[in-house]
Image (cartoon, rainbow, N blue to C red):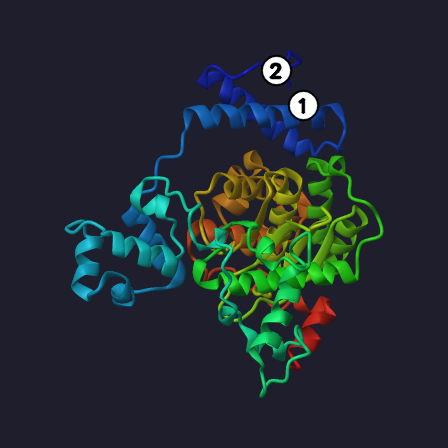
Amino acid sequence: MSDQNLKIIKTEEQYHSYLEECEFLLDKAPSAGSPESDRLDLLTLLIEKYEEQNFPIEPIDPIEAIKFRMNEQGLKQVDLAPYFGTKSRVSEVLSGKRPLTVQMIRALSSGLGISVETLVGLHVDESQDSRSSDTINWKLFPLSEMISRGWISNIQNKARNKDIVEDSLKKFIGVLSDNNHQPAAAFKRTLQGEAYSPNKKYSIFAWLSKVVQEASLDPVVNDFKQGSLNKEFLKELAHLSWFDEGPKLAIEFIEKHGIKVVIEPALKGMSLDGAALRTPAGNPVIGLTIREDRLDNFWFTLLHETVHIWKHLDTGSTFVDDLERSTEDKIEAEANRIARDTFIPRVAWKRSEAYLRPTRESIEQFAKDLKIHPAIIAGRIRRESGNFKVFADLVGYGEVRKHFSKFSVEEKL
């Protein structure tokens, strides 16, 4: 290993030299805080900077994005007919013979979750949509489900008076604002993330309100300190995945640092994994739905939302995330990258046997080396390859909800 001071990478030769040194240090597995560990972190930053400047990500082709989502969701061309109008138009668009129309783009964005930016190659300003309106249509709340789940208990299901219903919903939603008597202020929260959908806005606000209520009923003991969140915090959190009781240990660890974690299953039709937000009092909260009872989904969601708490809540946004979708949003992409690199350092990933020759044995060995659960590695292979049939026995199906009493109650209802 060279003793010379590290410098900004300017040549390809220097780039490969730094990669080799990274590989050497990774093999030594230096302890956190050691000079070698600090040097490894600095090398990684320099390499990432060089790669960002010299290997830019090319804009995603709209047709390729559609085909990727079809493969991801197991869709055939006939399944896309509702978005294009006819079967023949699907074939014509996917073959490049017919351009996408505005109506197609709107339908694909809403139905398949592909961003408008990807489909048209332009940034679309959504700041003037219905979420900014002071007018609330109380009929659009999923009232029946809210009642059945015990969220609103003072309304008789068969004799709903309009004024009573509206008053109850105002109180329920009002917890999202500084003043419980101003539910319209709650609706001015800026929602960001791939789980946001105008069609599900009322369900999202109902769910967020429940999360804030739960956080207020059982607050954390310790005060949150922004400075407590850093790379070492994330690494320690990631290493808890190694343990059988990892999900419970992780939530205990996060709450000891002043961040409340609320587990609340999503309402029907919501494509939501998690959320990061602040209460009106300014306290950080992570909401988890655990809609996918899989370890790989749980751990990635938890770190993704923790990154939002660390990096992004000062923007004033509430983040609602569907992490099964791909994203081009810069903030979401940053949260994905930091979470991904915390579990598996970028340099280590591309040189690992699990990446080059994925087998059960190589995945389990790599997980042991990194001190993380094999499900995280298996999940990444499935995601990057687009093949969700492989390593299904390694991603930890049925290994999350069993740790939380919330689901034993929900499943009886």
Residue located 74% across and 71% down the image: 405
Q: Nearer the viewer, residue 106 or 50?
A: 106
Asked whether the beta carbons under mark 1 and mark 2 sit within 8 Å of each other, the answer is yes
- The foreground one among 217 and 264 is 217
Q: Residue at x 71, y 28 (%)?
A: 37
- In the visual, does 246 lie left or right of 101? right
Q: Residue at x 72, y 66 (%)?
A: 403
State the CA–CA distance, disc 1 to disc 2: 9 Å
Q: Residues within 10 Å of mark 1 (few under 14, many from 20)?
A: some
Disc number at residue 39? 1
Left or right: 408 with respect to 53? right
Quickly name the residue at label 2.
6
Residue 384: image location, x then y, percent: 45, 49
Quadrant of the rendering where the N terminus is positioned: top right
- Find the residue positioned furthest to the top: 4
Image spot of residue 219 (x, y percent): 79, 56
- Estimate the x, y position of residue 231 in percent, counting from the top left: 68, 36
> In this orientation, does residue 243 appear?
no
Q: Secondary structure at mark 1?
A: helix
Across and down, in percent, residue 165 comes to 59, 75
Asked which quadrant contains residue 345, the reply is top right
The image shows residue 157, relative to residue 123, as above or below, that is below
